[in-house]
């Protein structure tokens, strides 16, 4: 009897030692964001043919309870909704949420100034929109560029991709500097940083415009092929944005003069 009791006590102590180890070894909690624009239907099982249990809120963040293969062999994620019910939503309507953005940051991109930018779930313009990057703002890049798309994290940790044509590699310190462009002669303001693009408007000599971005490398040769010029993205007098050549303009550090 004593021998049996000793065995039971030893087993209890052994299992008690294992419990803290199991807790310590738990997988970190994962969070996903739901696409914006429209709520996503949630079902009792990983198929739309199952019982509807509620909606995952558009743009909402949810803890991942389980990931499975479901309807049409697609990935489905089980979450707990605001009404307390648990349900499955398709993974292609979601993207991961990152909490420690700084540890993942490999660089920064500056969004175009004309309008807010769609952040897509995948590096594809047909993918669902996960959020909006604010025009003229800088966002952290959290990985390598994929087929011309930057992986970024939004302010709330939602992740996605923005196209390189509307998000430019940038140094946040440089972007924050106040500067303007001073014109020595009459100059044209173009829709793109090259003289072959559409002309938006013109600007007279001795005028000055706020500079919002510098294109550091020459992108356009004049007709003689002898000289290349840098380009500046500027805010026009009408509140729009365009590009001017450094041929008749000088970049000046400091705020725009009155």
Image (tube, rainbow, N blue to C red):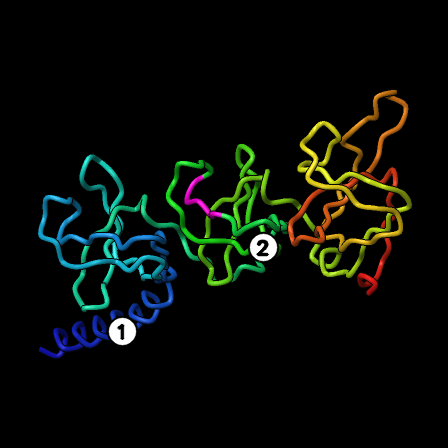
Neighbours of disc 1 within 10 Å: few (<14), some (14-19), many (20+):
few
| Magenta-tinted stretch | 118-122
The residue shown at (86%, 51%) is 182
Query: Is residue 206 positioned above or below 215 on the image?
Result: below
Quadrant (top left, top right, bottom left, bottom right) of the N terminus: bottom left
Q: Position of residue 258 (x, y in %)?
A: 82, 65
Residue 16 has which mark? Answer: 1
Q: Taking 167 as reference, is 183 left or right? A: right
Of circles 2 and 1, the one toward us is: 2
Q: Earlier in the sequence, mark 2 or mark 1?
A: 1
State the separation of the CA atoms marked 2 and 1: 47 Å
Which residue appears farthest toward the top when viewing the image? 224
The residue shown at (80%, 57%) is 179
Could you say which is closer to the camera, residue 247 or residue 228? 247
Most common SS among magenta residues: strand
The residue shown at (69%, 49%) is 170
Q: Which residue is mark 2?
A: 139
């Amino acid at each position: 009897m004593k021998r049996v009791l000793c065995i039971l006590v030893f087993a209890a102590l052994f299992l008690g030692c294992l419990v803290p180890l199991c807790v310590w070894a738990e997988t970190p909690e994962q969070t996903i964001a739901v696409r914006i624009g429209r709520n996503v239907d949630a079902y009792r099982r990983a198929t739309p043919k199952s019982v509807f249990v509620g909606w995952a809120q558009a743009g909402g963040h949810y803890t991942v309870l389980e990931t499975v293969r479901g309807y049409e062999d697609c990935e489905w994620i089980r979450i707990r909704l605001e009404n307390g019910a648990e349900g499955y939503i398709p993974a292609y309507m979601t993207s991961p949420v990152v909490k420690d953005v700084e540890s993942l940051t490999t660089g920064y991109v500056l969004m175009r100034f004309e309008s807010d930018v769609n952040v897509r779930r995948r590096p594809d313009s047909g993918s669902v929109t996960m959020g909006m990057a604010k025009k003229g703002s800088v966002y952290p890049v959290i990985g390598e560029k994929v087929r011309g798309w930057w992986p970024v994290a939004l302010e709330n940790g939602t992740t996605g991709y923005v196209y390189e044509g509307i998000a430019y590699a940038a140094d946040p310190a440089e972007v924050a500097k106040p500067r303007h462009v001073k014109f020595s002669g009459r100059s044209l303001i173009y829709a793109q940083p090259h003289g072959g693009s559409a002309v938006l408007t013109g600007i007279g000599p001795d005028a000055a415009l706020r500079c919002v971005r510098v294109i550091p490398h020459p992108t356009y040769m004049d007709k003689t092929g002898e000289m290349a010029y840098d380009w500046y993205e500027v805010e026009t007098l009408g509140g729009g944005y365009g590009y001017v050549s450094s041929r008749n303009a000088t970049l000046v550090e400091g705020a725009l003069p009155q």
